[in-house]
Amino acid sequence: MNAIVVTWRELLVALVVVLAVYAAEMLLLLRGLRARRADTAPREAPPAAGPATPTTEPPFAALALRGEIDTLRGEVAQLRAELAALTAPGAATSELAPYAQAIHLARDGKAAAQLVETCGISRAPPPPLSAPRRRR
């Protein structure tokens, strides 16, 4: 029985052949891509037969974009007003305000029971809030 023996030299030759085929394939694909780009490149429009007549109304697409821009401007104005209301001094009336107060009290070293009574939060959150105090 004859065994098939493959030497390092034969492996290297096979690797070079595979890489050459891969490089040739990539070059062909790039050439095809460049040809497609050249075909789809915008060409100059032929000159108009007569003088262009200016229209008084913008095209429909421009009107739609103007409407969308106006809508977005209104939304931005509304969000700015909401942001100003949230960042104003004394605006701590949100749902997170009791938890923010509990965090400050926990940093001051208050116990979990005191956090529950003072802030009016449920019993479950205080142990995680008071955990940083215990780590120190």
Image (spheres, rainbow, N blue to C red):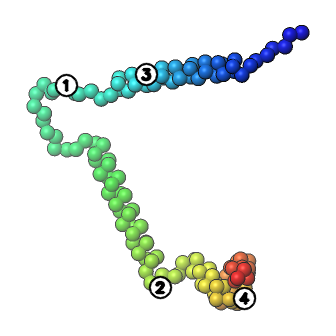
Which dot, 2 or 3, sits closer to the camera?
Answer: 3
Q: Earlier in the sequence, mark 2 or mark 4?
A: 2
Inter-mark Cα distance, 2 to 1: 66 Å
Task: Give me the C-alpha separation between circle 2 and circle 4.
Answer: 26 Å
Residue placed under numbered mark 3 in the picture: 31
Residue contact between numbered discs 1 and 3, judged by CB atoms under 8 Å:
no
Image coordinates for residue 40, horizontal then vertical, percent: 35, 26
Q: Are marks 2 and 1 in contact (CB under 8 Å)?
A: no
Cα–Cα gap, marks 4 and 3 = 73 Å
Residue 37 is drawn in which quadrant?
top left
Kind of residue sitting beneath label 2: Gly
Q: Residue at x 72, y 85 (%)?
A: 112
Q: Is residue 120 visible?
A: no
What label does residue 90 carry, if any?
Answer: 2
Identity of the amino acid at label 4?
Ala
> Is label 3 in a helix, a strand or a loop?
helix
Q: Which residue is mark 1?
A: 46
What's the amino acid at mark 1?
Answer: Pro
Mark 2 / mark 1, whichever is N-terminal: 1
Q: Which of the marked residues, 2 or 3, is nearer the chain's N terminus?
A: 3
